[in-house]
Structure formats: structure tokens, C-alpha cells
Image: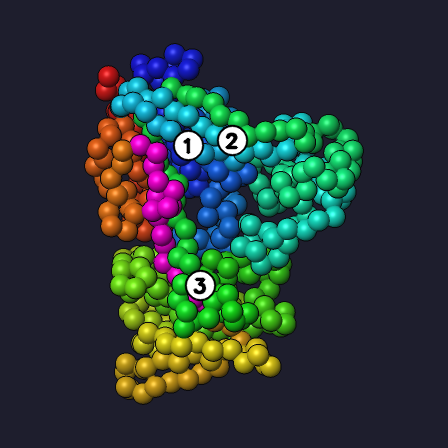
Amino acid sequence: MAQGQNGERSILVVGGGMSGLSAALEAAEAGFQVYLVEREPYLGGRVSRMNKYFPKLCPPNCGLEINFRRIRNNPLIRFFTMTEVEKIVGEAGNFDITLKSSPRYVNDKCTGCGACAEAATTHIANPFNYGLDTVKAAYLPHEFAFPMRYVLAPEVIGSEEAAAIKAACPYDAIDLDMQPSTFDLKVGAVIWATGWEPYDAGKIGYYGFGKHKNVISNVMMERLAAYNGPTNGRIVRLSDNRQAGRVAFVQCAGSRDENHLAYCSGVCCLASLKQATYLLEQNPEAQATIFYIDIRALGKYEDFFTKVQADERVTLIKGKAGEITEDSTTGMVTVQVEDQSSGKILKDQFDLVVLATGMVPASATDKVPAEAACDEHGFMLGEQPTGGIIGAGCVKKPVDVATSVQDATAAALKAIQATFRR
């Protein structure tokens, strides 16, 4: 068996989203020691920040909770949050891994009671909600966080406030002396499942993202629609917190564009169709307009597209949106587009505009710290120069959740096979 620190077969899984969780569980349930590493303070990745996901349009926490229970019940899985991989040295069957953990300032005595948050006074932007609201400097990442443990923001370390937070904890769970730490592992294979990042819509200057309050991205829309999001599930205009009635969805925001993302992410059309249903379910009087190049809803999702398209409250306009402007007095947002069916230039006003930005592989910016091969967009190739390093999920190509899980299962099998190569 490939040697881990305890002499057992071992596999490192990098990334605690759906791909990483699935790969870790498959390998561990096959009898392999698994080390699961996640840079955020919780497991669950992007899926945990969604309102609903395909194919069943169910809340993510039901599926995640099952996986978390499987992790709790499996002694072969050890997970490390707020941790990243610094170095990978070796070959299939024999890798030396260096990991670096950032301080949480909260130890494993934490019961999630919330006394620390009550004592905190500083507010910081809430990373879980993409900065749409704030949280206390002592915070639980979200209400279904796994592990269910608070985090103390580094901004208050060394302050009187930090001392007050520590004094408020009845379980001695606040450790203000925590420091970054590094440690080493020996594993037989590495599964790289770090997922994706939404394309930075601020780079598309003519859409005004970051300047116009009522222009948001599709990932922000997921948090607005979620009952545990910044507005308790109310889809509102950010300028005045009024319920949004007329909402535009702008497809291919930066995608299929040589100046931004040259490729199609495949899932953005379905995401906008899904988000249109959020709006219409919440507000029967609302109207959704989707500006698109072409709608990509293949296979089993064709029926879903047909159903949404048939709703008289949904308008689909074939045309790539041009400049987006906002009236500073009313907050109304104007979208200009050339309607390809008529050849006319259309201008219409909306309460809210949602930009369907594409998926950028995390491997494009957070490189694998070993010899690794990626395409021109940063997606990991199927065949790697270093045997035993295997990509999984959205680091290989843009895919939906179900496909990510399938790919993770394949990656786990490849990793198991790689541990024998010595």
C-alpha cells in the first residue's frame, strides 16, 4: 500500500466543494486514508452558496448534510479548513505535501453558542454573501457551516475588542495566540478539485458592474433568492431595498468574447432560466427578460427550458446586450440591445439586471504547486505530466453539479490506481 504518515494508503483531495467531497468520500469508503483540504473556513464550496441547484431544484443543504454525515462517520477522512497546499514533491505513489493553515482564532472547544458574536462590535463584509451584507468580526460562516465553528476576523486581533470577545466565551474556545502553521503529509495521489470562480464582471466596463447598484452578477442573485441570504430570500433592488418587479438577465456577460472569456461555460443559460423561476415564484406580478445569443439547455434540460419559455411573464430576446446605464435618481437600469429577429435597437428599463458571468477555473489563478498542464484558459488537462495528480470537476471544464460528482468519482478511481505506482 502507498505510504501515508501512518503507513496506510493515502490520498490528498484539494478543495472541499462538491467535487472534492465526492472524491474524498468515494476514496475513503473504498478503504483509503483521505486528507481533505479547503481554504475556506467551511466545506461545501460554491454549492453551499446556491439557493437551488439542478437537476432537482432542491436546496443544497439537503445533499450537503448527507455528505457531511458520511464524513463524520468515516474515520478514514481527515479534513483541514482554512488550509492551502504550498508544495507538492514526488511522483505517483510517493508524494511529499506541504500544507499551510491560517489561524481561525477559534479552537475545537467551540460549541457554536454565539457568545463571541454578541461581544463583537466591528462589522466586516460578509464573504459568504459576496459582500452584499456584513457580519460581526466573530462570525459563523453560515448557519449550516461544517464544521459548525466560529471564525474571528484578523482585523480585530490585538485590539480591546478581541480581548472582550475572548472573555465572553464560556468554553475557552477563543485562542488569540493562534499563528499560521505548516505541516507535511505523505500521500500516494493528489486530486485537485479547487472548483471555479465567477468571472469578474467589473472587467466588462460597459455593463457598469460595481458602479451601478442595481446591476449584479448571477452568483449574487443566488444569495438574494436564498432564505438564509442577505435579504432573507427577497429579490430586491440594492439601491433602495424595494422588491424587484422587472428583471433582466444578460447572458454571456464576458463569455464567448475574445476580450474576456473566449469559451461558453455551458451552465449559465440554465442558471438564468432557474433564477427567472425564483423571481416569478416570489412575485407573480414580476416580469423576466432574458437577452441571449443562443440558449443552451441540452438533453434532459430541454423540457425545463420549454416550460420557462412558455410562461407569458418571460420574454426572450435574441441579442447580445450592449451598454447598461442606471438613472441615479430612480435607480432604474436601462439595457440597450440589437434584437436580431427584427434588426431594431431596443432600450428598456428594469429594476434589476443580472449578469450571467462565466466560470473561471480556480486553477487559472491558484496554480497547482507542481508540474501541471492546463489549457490556454487555465483548465487542467486530463493527462498530467506528473502522474498521480488528477483534476476533478470544474477545474477541468465548466460543468453542472451532477456532472462534477460523476467526474469526482472517476478521479477517485484514478487516484486509487495511482497509489500503486511506485
Q: Does residue 125 appear to the left or right of 207 in the view shown?
A: right
Amino acid type for the residue under numbered disc 1: Val
> Is 17 displayed left or right of 160 in the figure?
left
Q: Which numbered tag is attached to residue 202?
A: 3
- Residue 248 visible? The answer is yes
What residue is shown at x 74% (from left), y 48% (from top)? 121
Position in image of residue 410 (x %, y %): 29, 35
Q: Residues within 10 Å of mark 1 (few under 14, many from 20)?
A: many
Which is more N-terminal, label 2 or label 1?
1
Residue found at x 27% / y 83%: 341
Q: Amino acid at mark 3?
A: Gly
Q: Name the residue tied to disc 1.
A: 85
Query: In this rendering, is residue 184 above or below 402?
Result: above
Task: Please state the horizontal and vertical placement of residue 149, each as a whole percent of the image.
Answer: 62, 35
Local crowd size for mark 3, using a 10 Å CA cut-off: few (<14), some (14–19), many (≥20): some
Q: Earlier in the sequence, mark 2 or mark 3?
A: 2
Q: Does 77 sit above or below residue 249?
A: above
Q: CA distance from mark 1 to mark 2?
A: 9 Å
Q: Would you say residue 275 is visible in this rendering?
A: no
Identify the secondary structure beneath mark 2. Answer: strand
Residue placed furthest toward the top: 7
Q: Secondary structure at mark 3?
A: helix
Q: CA distance from mark 2 to mark 3?
A: 31 Å
Residue 411 at x, y percent in the picture: 30, 34
Q: Residues within 10 Å of mark 2 (few under 14, many from 20)?
A: many
* Residue located 32% across and 51% down the image: 398
Numbered marks: total: 3
Q: Position of residue 199 (x, y in %)?
A: 39, 57
Stretch of the chain drawn in magenta: 354-370
Q: Quadrant of residue 103?
A: top right
41 or 303: which is nearer to us? 41
